[in-house]
Amino acid sequence: MTDGIDGEGLTLPADPEMVRASARAVLEANWRPEGYTVPNAEVYPFQWLWDSCFHAITWADLGESDRARSELAHLFRTQNAEGFVPHIDYEFSPNHHGDFWKREGHSSITQPPMFGHAIAELARRSVDVSDLVGPATAGLNFLFDRRARVDGLIALCHPWESGGDDCPRWDHWSPDGWDVSKWRETKGALVGTVQHSTVGSPISNPSFVVASCGFNALVAFNAYELASVTGDASLNEKAEALSHRLFEQWDEQIGTWVDAGDSATDSGRVRSLDAMLPVLVTANESVIERVFSDLRDETAFGGATGPTGMHRDEPTFEARTYWRGPAWPQLTYLFWVAARRQRRAEDATAFADMLTRGAVASSWSEYWDANDGTGLGAAPQSWAALAAVVQPR
């Protein structure tokens, strides 16, 4: 590797148990008596959907099955009759942002449904998940059956639903050029154009017509995972159909999956890291080989502390700007999972090492510089504790 990318001086901690102990301390500090873990006590003092799923996985891996179960059970507390799971639960301050969301207690949009994978991970550790599979199945079926489609793929209703808030994939909606202040205003306006069902579920957004490849990959992956626990043939068939449709979005020339919808000819084609998540559910060997090669190539996504959030050759790549270049622990974890699913042991070890170096070097930050692990965003952030899960046993 070249200087500046090899993370000179970044060595792996000598003892995996020290990493696990530090990860536990991060989660303990952010645990709340109501039964869930906040991402960060000051910046993110509520419960977030996909964060809590990653927290549950880590709690279970640390042997805390009661906390793992509680994390997921509490997540479904605000689920409605159609299966919609809000992305934020404002339990202890129900009016917080109430005017913004036009409702009390929780947000009006969702996030990647990582609860399918979380439940499967708990089940693999012999944790009783019998009371969780019903809500999780309903949550996934809401997306499959009620959410609008764009060219056969599941639509997003808002950029926040993807988890990648300021990703350049959404620059189509910044026609005068992306600027963080203007984009903040745009995101706020897009909340107001979400169309909801009669019971308040987000169904579509005529001002934001897009089907994210990353989001669709996570829906399919989580459906596969949940079906592996429940034996739900219908859910498995839906995941299979979505995965097949999603593969059609692969563009061999540029080496990425392309979003469907209004951005398909411009920003929906930029090589962002989340757009590589369909490697979780594809079976095409040549595509799998190319994706993992790019994820570790220092001229593409490769970094000492995790894959970069954007391909380094993209004009929008900014090494330390929120969702436009840094490494993210939950994404590095997902590519570790993908490598294991695709039986790529060397790649899995590499991602585990990246995640470990990044979490420790950044002091367990929300995200970090992929080259040297400089911490960015909130710290400590609970999902960085995923580093515990990837430690060798």
Image (tube, grey):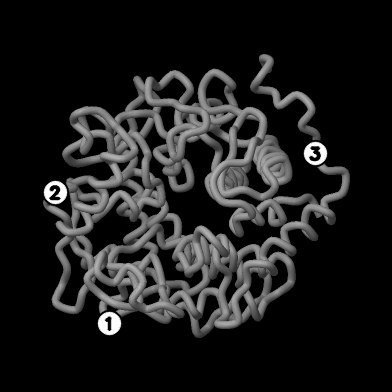
- Classify mark 3: residues with Cα within 10 Å, few (<14), some (14-19) or many (20+): some
Q: In the figure, 49 relative to 266: above or below? A: below
Residue 382 vs residue 310, the one in the foreground? 382
Quarter holding residue 352: top right
Name the residue type under label 3: Leu
| SS category of the residue bearing label 3 | loop
Under mark 1, the amino acid is Ala
Q: Position of residue 112 (x, y in %)?
A: 40, 58
Nearer mark to the viewer, of 3 and 1: 3
**Viewer-proximal residue, 5 or 114?**
5
Q: CA distance from mark 2 to mark 3?
A: 46 Å
Spot occupied by residue 291 in the image (x, y as percentages of width and height): 49, 31
| Residue 12 badge | 3
Q: Earlier in the sequence, mark 2 or mark 3?
A: 3
Which residue, given by chain and number where applicable, does mark 1 sit on?
81
Quadrant location of the C terminus in the rendered image: bottom right
Q: Secondary structure at mark 2?
A: loop
Point 21% across, 74% down: residue: 200
From the viewer's perspective, tell me whether residue 23 is left or right of residue 91: right
How far, Cα to Cα, is label 1 from label 2?
26 Å
